[in-house]
């Protein structure tokens, strides 16, 4: 599991990140004896069942059973892979990774500088919006749109002054290389006959910083304040080494936790819509840059959820956008619903008029995509004419063909027929002309949703085997004693047997492994969670040496009892030859003598 990272480097990262500090920065914790407890970030609960053990540097939830070490927590909380969790924790501890010192180091350093430039200009524009007289129009606009101070602060809104060279002069005074600031998309170079000159990209605009998944500002969207000015209402950053509009959602850094919790994502059209939704309680929401939704956006959402609700504006452009994103969402196996905001509203104005709860009701009542699409086609075509009906049927047939779902196909065949006032058979035959066979590459919305299943938890080991795992990490003397007195075949539970074998193997090779390092070496999440559960209880074990001896003695005798049962079964067979019976009786006596043998406890 460690992959490209050496164990010494991983241990350095563990030493530089205390699990209580890391988890406590993301989840409110309070001390409870030797542990820290809080509400689990991975499932909804009212009574704390989430525990962090500082001595073992592990976490475990007794409610949803997620558990593991520090790397595992970051993987689960941030929804990233192991390598990314290592990188984030290394950065937090100020540790340079070996993998960051290769030929690509120059590019990484450049990106780090671009992140810093974006952060610095974000702070500057925030300060200007907060108090600069030049930003009064922006403050008035926000007040008119009822964007309160909390929202302004949370989403780090700012204002870029009207001057052509404000950012240029700021960059010069900050000692920044203007070519790098140009690469960041903040200024534009104009080549003249004698020399090149720079001017600001964002001028006289309300600024919406765009952040990546980690909350780092990577781009900006600027809105003009004067509606009568004949120019694009929004101006966005260009593509840069740290920003690709195909891969970044506005607001995703703030909404991803709510998206995971709610198990679906709402997709809206613009920044102000998102802010209004988020501040009124619909926090599981994202917005692409404009309506430019892409396959990369769909793939990003698929990492978190299996269902999306489209909530674009109620005008024709918004509805057309809902149609455009269908293929990309379907290709990612995402179930799709559509929430229609009544005209003439958009999400922002609807919330202002009717409140956040009313908007949440709209989301809850969102229809399946194909219900929306059928209505959309009927508005776009005259369903009273043969030509219009044929266009509707062909478009529906083509869309349904992509789902590869026979149930969805059949349901909307009937719904289309009912909507058009024709027979189901006629629609089915017409669908057949454009959909030769219902099977397609991509499972449809219903299938995508139904195919999702939580991974099965491992069967529970016996109480004795459960406690055996605890003794593996109490004292190295225990390991030496276990290696001498325990046979792996005495352990009935396959995963516990694997954990014990791995621990004893590392001990035999004289490889020191703390709990976290040992968990990192395991390649199965269910195995990690089982071990975390056994180690989560921080209560002191009275006379642990004697209890370990009792556990191993019980497992030994349990195995011997199984042997006796098998011997008895064989002896009961009719017509058993005398020699075999005698041998079985001899084995039975040996097994019973073994049961009487004493085991001295460790120490």
Image (tube, helix red, strand yellow):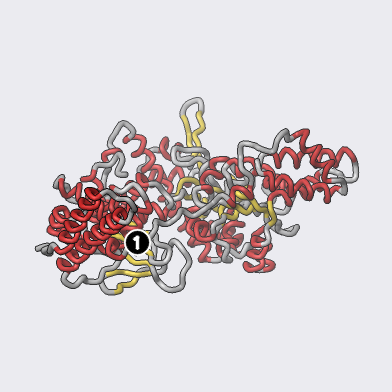
**CA neighbours of label 1 inside 10 A, class few (<14), some (14 to 19), many (20+):** some
Q: Residue at x 83, y 51 (%)?
A: 418
Q: Residue at x 51, y 66 (%)?
A: 150
| Residue drawn where x is 15% and y is 60% of the image | 593
- Report the residue that reaches farthest toward the left: 603
What is the residue that sits farthest to the right in this orientation?
385
Depth order, front residue of 125/197: 125
**Residue 20: horizontal and vertical position, in percent?**
30, 63
**Which residue is nearer to you in this view: 536 or 59?**
536
Tell which residue pokes out farthest to the top in this image.
193
Q: Is residue 100 visible?
A: no
- 202 vs 61, left or right, is right
Q: Which residue is mark 1?
A: 23
Observer-nearest of 474 and 481: 481
In percent of width and height, residue 498 lies at: 29, 50
Percent x, y for residue 27?
Answer: 39, 65
Local secondary structure at mark 1? helix
Determine which quarter of the picture holds residue 18.
bottom left
Q: How many circles with numbers are drawn on the protein?
A: 1
Residue drawn where x is 44% and y is 61% of the image: 42
Q: In what quadrant of the picture does the N terminus appear?
A: top left
Q: Is residue 494 left or right of residue 582?
A: right
Above or below: residue 194 compared with residue 81: above
Residue 25, image quadrant: bottom left
Q: Position of residue 572 (x, y in %)?
A: 32, 56
Residue 545 vs residue 340: left or right? left
**Quadrant where the image shows the C terminus:** bottom left
Q: Is residue 165 in sight in this rendering?
A: yes
């Amino acid at each position: 599991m460690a992959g490209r990272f050496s164990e010494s480097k991983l241990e350095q990262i563990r030493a530089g990140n205390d699990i209580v500090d890391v988890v406590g920065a993301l989840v409110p914790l309070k001390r409870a004896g030797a542990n820290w407890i809080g509400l689990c970030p991975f499932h909804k609960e009212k009574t704390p069942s989430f525990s962090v053990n500082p001595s073992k540097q592990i976490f475990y939830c007794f409610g949803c059973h997620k558990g593991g070490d520090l790397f595992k927590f970051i993987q689960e909380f941030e929804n990233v892979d192991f390598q990314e969790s290592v990188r984030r924790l290394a950065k937090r501890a100020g540790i340079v990774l070996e993998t960051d010192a290769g030929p690509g180091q120059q590019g990484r350093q450049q990106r780090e500088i671009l992140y810093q430039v974006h952060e610095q200009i974000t702070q500057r524009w925030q300060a200007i919006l907060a108090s600069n007289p030049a930003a009064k129009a922006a403050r008035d606009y926000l007040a008119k749109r009822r964007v309160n101070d909390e929202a302004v602060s949370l989403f780090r809104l700012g204002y870029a002054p009207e001057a052509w060279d404000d950012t240029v002069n700021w960059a010069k005074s900050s000692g920044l290389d203007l070519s790098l600031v140009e690469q960041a998309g903040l200024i534009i170079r104009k080549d003249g006959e004698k020399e090149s000159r720079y001017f600001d990209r964002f001028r006289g605009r309300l600024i919406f910083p765009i952040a990546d998944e980690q909350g780092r500002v990577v781009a900006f969207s600027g809105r003009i304040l004067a509606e009568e000015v004949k120019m694009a209402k929004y101006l966005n950053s260009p593509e840069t080494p740290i920003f690709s509009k195909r891969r970044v959602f506005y607001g995703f850094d703030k909404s991803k936790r709510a998206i995971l919790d709610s198990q679906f994502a709402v997709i809206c059209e613009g920044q102000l819509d998102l802010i209004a939704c988020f501040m009124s309680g619909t926090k599981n929401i994202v917005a692409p840059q404009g309506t430019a939704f892409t396959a990369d956006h769909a793939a990003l959402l698929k990492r978190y959820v299996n269902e999306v609700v489209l909530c674009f504006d109620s005008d024709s452009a918004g509805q057309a956008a809902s149609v455009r994103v269908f293929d990309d969402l379907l290709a990612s196996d995402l179930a799709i619903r559509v929430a229609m905001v009544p005209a003439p509203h958009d999400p922002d104005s609807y919330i202002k008029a009717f409140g956040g709860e009313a908007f949440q009701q709209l989301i809850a009542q969102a229809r399946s995509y194909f219900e929306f699409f059928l209505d959309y086609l009927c508005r776009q075509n005259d369903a009273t004419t043969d030509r219009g009906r044929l266009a509707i049927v062909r478009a529906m047939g083509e869309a349904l063909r992509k789902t590869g779902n026979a149930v969805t196909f059949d349901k909307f065949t009937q719904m289309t027929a009912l909507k058009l006032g024709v027979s189901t058979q006629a629609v089915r035959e017409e669908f057949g002309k454009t959909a030769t066979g219902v099977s397609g590459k991509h499972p449809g919305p219903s299938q995508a949703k139904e195919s999702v299943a939580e991974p099965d938890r491992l069967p529970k080991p016996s109480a004795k085997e459960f406690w055996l795992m605890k003794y593996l990490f109490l004292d190295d003397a225990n390991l030496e004693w276990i290696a001498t007195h325990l046979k792996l075949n005495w352990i009935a539970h396959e995963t516990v047997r694997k954990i014990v074998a791995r621990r004893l193997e590392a001990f035999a090779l004289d490889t020191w492994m703390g709990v976290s390092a040992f968990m990192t070496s395991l390649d199965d999440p269910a195995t990690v969670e089982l071990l975390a559960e056994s180690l989560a209880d921080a209560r002191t074990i009275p006379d642990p040496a004697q209890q370990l001896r009792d556990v191993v003695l019980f497992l030994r005798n349990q195995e011997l009892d199984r042997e006796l049962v098998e011997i008895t079964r064989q002896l009961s067979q009719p017509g058993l030859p005398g020699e075999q019976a005698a041998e079985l009786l001899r084995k039975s006596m040996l097994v019973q003598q073994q049961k009487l043998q004493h085991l001295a406890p460790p120490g």
